[in-house]
Amino acid sequence: MTSDNASDQNDNAKVRIPPPLCFAAFLIAGLLLQSDWINGEIGSGGRTLFGALLFAVSLCVIIKEALAHKKSGSNVEPWKPTTLILSTGLYAYSRNPIYVGMAFAYLGVAFAAGSFGAMALLPFCLLVIYYRVIALEEAYLARKFGDEYLAYKQKIRRWL
């Protein structure tokens, strides 16, 4: 039993930063730097509506793909073992549809808040996601699944 637990502890991408927390931290920092909301302003109806719609659609993407992980028996959390390579749904078009959804949800909130500060921090957030999450996941998946993952990686784009 101990060796199985040790094996499970080693069977993961070694991701230490939960992606939702990373996006939330950068978003909050950006909103605190500059946001119409801090001044008590709601913003224009059109901008707020667009941001809310972008957030809602993005949240639907995140939930849909997280449920696809659950339905397939795979873990959505990058610090847990991956049991299979999802290649259906939005994974047929992007290797990281949940992170794309998180980025667009972030943009939706930033846009609705009129926060150029949050928008300016998004590229830095994506760099952290790439180097501290995606790069680790891709190396892990290549080790675990070999040619199957490499073929998927060659066929499907990382982002969009």
Image (cartoon, rainbow, N blue to C red):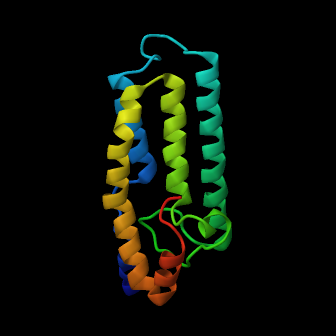
Q: Is residue 115 left or right of residue 51?
A: left
Q: Residue at x 53, y 63 (%)?
A: 76
**Quadrant assignment for the N terminus:** bottom left
Q: Residue 55: percent from the left, percent from the top?
A: 59, 38
Q: Is residue 1 left or right of residue 160?
A: left
Residue 108 found in image quarter: top right
Label tally: 0
Please say whether residue 8 is visible from this viewpoint: no
Q: Residue 82: percent from the left, percent from the top?
A: 50, 74
Q: Is residue 56 left or right of residue 4?
A: right
Q: Nearer the viewer, residue 4 or 116?
A: 116
104 shown above or below 148: above
Q: Extreme bottom residue here?
A: 147
Residue 87 found in image quarter: bottom right
145 shown above or below 34: below
Q: Residue at x 66, y 64 (%)?
A: 68
11 shown above or below 78: below
Q: Is residue 149 left or right of residue 89?
A: left
Q: Residue at x 48, y 31 (%)?
A: 110
Q: Residue at x 34, y 68 (%)?
A: 136
Please say whether residue 139 is visible from this viewpoint: yes
52 shown above or below 83: above
Q: Residue 31: percent from the left, percent from the top?
A: 40, 26
Q: Nearer the viewer, residue 42 or 5?
A: 42
